[in-house]
Amino acid sequence: MQKDLPNTQSQMKSDFSSISPTAKLVAYFREFTDIPCAKDVARIIDAKTVTETLCPDPVMLNDLKKFVAPAVEARYKSMISAIKTTGIHQVLELASGLSFRGIVMTTDPDMLYAETDLPALTREKMSVVEQIPVLQQAYQRPNLFVDAVDALSISDLNHALRHFDPKKPIAVVHEGLYMYLSRTEKETLANNIKEILSRFGGVWITPDFMVEAEMQQLMNQPRVRSVMDSMTTSIATLTGRDLRQDQFKDQCELSNFFEKLDYKFTTYPQIDGSYKLSSLKTFPMTENHLNVLKEALRLWILRLR
């Protein structure tokens, strides 16, 4: 198992107290998909209890599952599809949390994949791995790496890059990170990734740039607005990070921000028919709601100018 963690395996905690509420929340919704090991992960970290704390109204939570589970699944699978489409075989994932995307990508022996996150969460993640045989076996692969990394620290990122060939392009990817950053932190991360891409070449792939106008499109559904307002407030209280702050107001502001940092980008729909949304079997969605998701959920692929 390739890892660079500050504590040994025997020192890892077992109560998963360091896993952020948002990571557990996403893990809960993955439980209703066919994402590998998602059900076991949700059970081990008791994602249901955290989710019910964030959303104590059972009726509201049921509504949330129907809408968010497909969105979470689309985000996960669209990232895998996009990486494969680029043809790039070196991937650095930031704030990887409990997605375990690397186990899917490294079934290809030519793929080098590094999952990174903050030290405390990385330790807890590896505790989860040790309790699930399929994961334990996967993390023995010589092409799958785990590093404790602060994505806002270029020195941390440089250390994680030791796994990769600087003569080959790299894909820097993340999901569920950028929206929690302040505008200053957003710029810091963009510049860090810029430094990486200037050395390796390659792309930055993320679904994290939803602007306020697109969020309002989702909120036009009455039950969705009620649920999301409640959840956003609860997350802000627990994490100190408010999803409603420091977001890009519209596409123009987003474009200007990245153009000043020497990026160009293209966007693609996350739900493009290239994979199946297994969660729709459990939570059938009306065509209207599915169209709302298709319109709102996009993936950004950025390159340096």
Image (cartoon, rainbow, N blue to C red):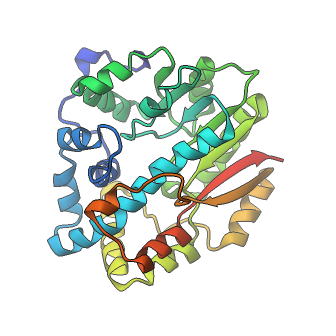
Q: Quadrant of residue 36?
A: top left
Task: Please state the horizontal and vertical placement of residue 170, each as a whole percent of the image.
Answer: 67, 32
Q: Residue at the right extreme?
A: 305
Q: Residue at x 45, y 84 (%)?
A: 220
Judging depth in this view, the residue of 273 and 240 nearest the camera is: 273
Q: Residue at x 51, y 19 (%)?
A: 143
**Number of numbered labels in the structure image:** 0
Judging depth in this view, the residue of 6 and 146 nearest the camera is: 146
Task: Please state the horizontal and vertical placement of residue 304, each as a whole percent of the image.
Answer: 79, 45
| Residue 57 seen in the figure | no
Q: Residue at x 72, y 30 (%)?
A: 169
Above-or-below relation of 92 to 208 = above
| Residue 137 seen in the figure | yes
Q: Is residue 83 left or right of residue 64?
A: right
Judging depth in this view, the residue of 66 and 18 nearest the camera is: 66
Q: Quadrant of residue 2?
A: top left
Task: Please state the horizontal and vertical placement of residue 164, each as a whole percent of the image.
Answer: 63, 20
Task: Please state the horizontal and vertical placement of residue 121, each as a whole percent of the image.
Answer: 35, 35
Quadrant where the N terminus sits is: top left
Judging depth in this view, the residue of 127 and 243 nearest the camera is: 127
Above-or-below relation of 199 to 259 = above
Q: Is residue 281 left or right of residue 218?
A: left
Above-or-below relation of 235 to 4 = below
Q: Residue at x 53, y 27 (%)?
A: 113
Q: Is residue 193 left or right of residue 40?
A: right
